[in-house]
Image (cartoon, grey):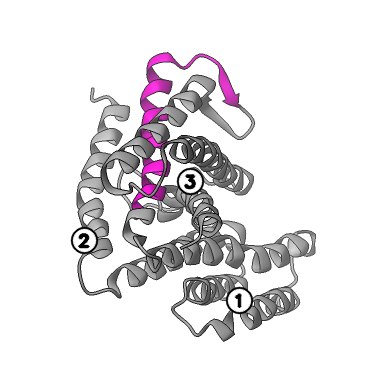
Amino acid sequence: MADPKRSNLTLRLLTAGVTVPLILYSLFFPPRWLFPLLTALVCTLSAIELFGMVAPKHPITRAWGVTSSLFLCLAVGGILDPQWTTPSFIAITVGGLLTSLIQVEPIAQAASRAAWAVAGPFYLGGLFGVISWLFHQPHGGEWVVLAMLYAFWSDTAGYFVGRAFGKHRLYVAVSPNKTIEGSIGGVFGALLGSLIAHFWFLPSLGLLPAILLAIVAAILGQLGDLCESLIKRSTGFKDSGTMLPGHGGFFDRVDALLFTSATVYFYVVWQGP
């Protein structure tokens, strides 16, 4: 009988083999609108998955959440005129709360839906917008790749180290399969990615900042993964979707990336042009 874990790993690698070249092409080759378009598309698909979990029987909340997430992604990412950014924050807050009044049953979950109608767009739209914002900075493609290395290499290293050496559970109530050993392995995976960036394609990232940034990004990325796991467990879902073979849904794949991108964003802002 085939090993399901081995089969899943094969699917993950095949999916990565298709998506990674497309992402790299969109980052470093014309047309310049391709990567922001892909970011907006993945944001929309992730929002569909998120609101399908938190408001499965409330189409108005789902439609609001998906539309607002996309709009905020475009506003924060600099695709829309900057004058729309602050008004969009206000409109999403007020509008999200008002949507909860349209379909209030079951009343016991009304407050939760109202909270998601506001928080969901900031969570996905805001953080996807950060990825697009990074792309438009000097050496933007390299900064985005760095955020991806932090997320995906940490995840990959954590997976293999956890399988080989994992004995102590990290957070059983949220994600029973994650281990402390795997988490530590994930930090070293991010460190390796950061060192490659420093010595190869992002020399403006100093050695000490590269090390410190990798540690912070790896920890926050893993916390981002746990946040998504908490959402899934609280709503009764194993995966956010099925659109990415071997990975689950788009939201499953980007949960850590959203947090590592935010980490890189704060570093880029702090170091200045």
Indicate which disc residue 163 carries: none
Q: What element does badge 1 sit on?
A: helix
Q: CA distance from mark 3 to mark 1?
A: 28 Å
Tell me which numbered mark, 2 or 1, is placed earlier along the sequence: 2
Check disc 1 and give the amino acid type: Ile
Along the viewing direction, whichever of 228 and 106 lies nearer the viewer? 228
| Residue 215 percent location from the top left of the image | 51, 35
Helix, strand or loop: magenta stretch: helix
Residue 48 in view in this figure: no
Q: Which residues are magenta?
A: 145-171
Which residue in the protein does label 2 denote?
A: 25
Check disc 3 and give the amino acid type: Ala
Q: What element does badge 2 sit on?
A: helix
Which residue in the protein does label 3 denote?
A: 256
**Mark nearer the viewer, 2 or 1:** 2
Residue at coordinates 37% horizontally, 48% vertically from top-left?
146
| Residue 227 percent location from the top left of the image | 59, 45
Residue at coordinates 54% horizontally, 22% vertically from top-left?
180
